[in-house]
């Protein structure tokens, strides 16, 4: 049985939020170590832009794989 659209979006959103927090923590640690100086507010903005892209990517790929898997299973019943 395939995962529904709503559950796919919830999963993708959860994945992105966790990824966002890890990315933000990584930026706060790595940027100063390599000489990149940005404010916390700038870090939040940078991360937010990547969150939007990541959420869309994760959701669309999940739906694509779900569709391919569903079509493949439908063809096996013949």
Image: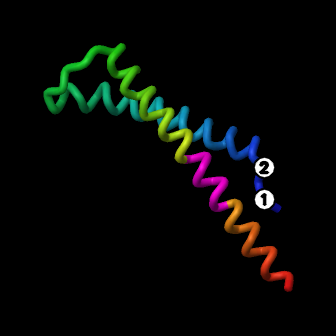
Q: The C terminus appears in which quarter of the rendering?
A: bottom right
Tell me what residue is drawn at x 76 percent, y 41 percent: 6
Tell me what residue is drawn at x 70 percent, y 68 percent: 69
Dominant SS of magenta comes to helix
> Which residue range is magenta in the image?
58-65
Q: On the image, which quarter does residue 55 sit in?
A: top right
Q: Are marks 2 and 1 in contact (CB under 8 Å)?
A: yes
* Residue 2 badge: 1
Q: Residue furthest right?
A: 78
Report if residue 9 lies within the magenta region: no
Position of residue 56 in the picture relative to residue 38 (left or right): right
In this view, 35 is above or below 1: above
Tell me what residue is drawn at x 45 percent, y 26 percent: 48
Q: Is mark 1 on a helix, strand or loop?
A: loop
- In percent of width and height, residue 19 lies at 48, 37
Q: Which of 32 and 49 is in front in this view?
A: 49
Q: Distance between the residues labelled 2 and 1?
A: 6 Å
In this view, 64 is above or below 24: below
């Amino acid at each position: 049985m395939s995962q529904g659209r709503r559950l796919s979006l919830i999963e993708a959103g959860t994945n992105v939020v966790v990824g966002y927090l890890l990315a933000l923590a990584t930026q706060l640690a790595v940027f100063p170590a390599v000489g990149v100086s940005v404010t916390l507010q700038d870090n939040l903005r940078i991360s937010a832009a990547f969150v939007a892209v990541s959420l869309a990517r994760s959701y669309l790929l999940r739906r694509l794989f779900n569709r391919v898997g569903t079509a493949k299973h439908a063809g096996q019943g013949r």
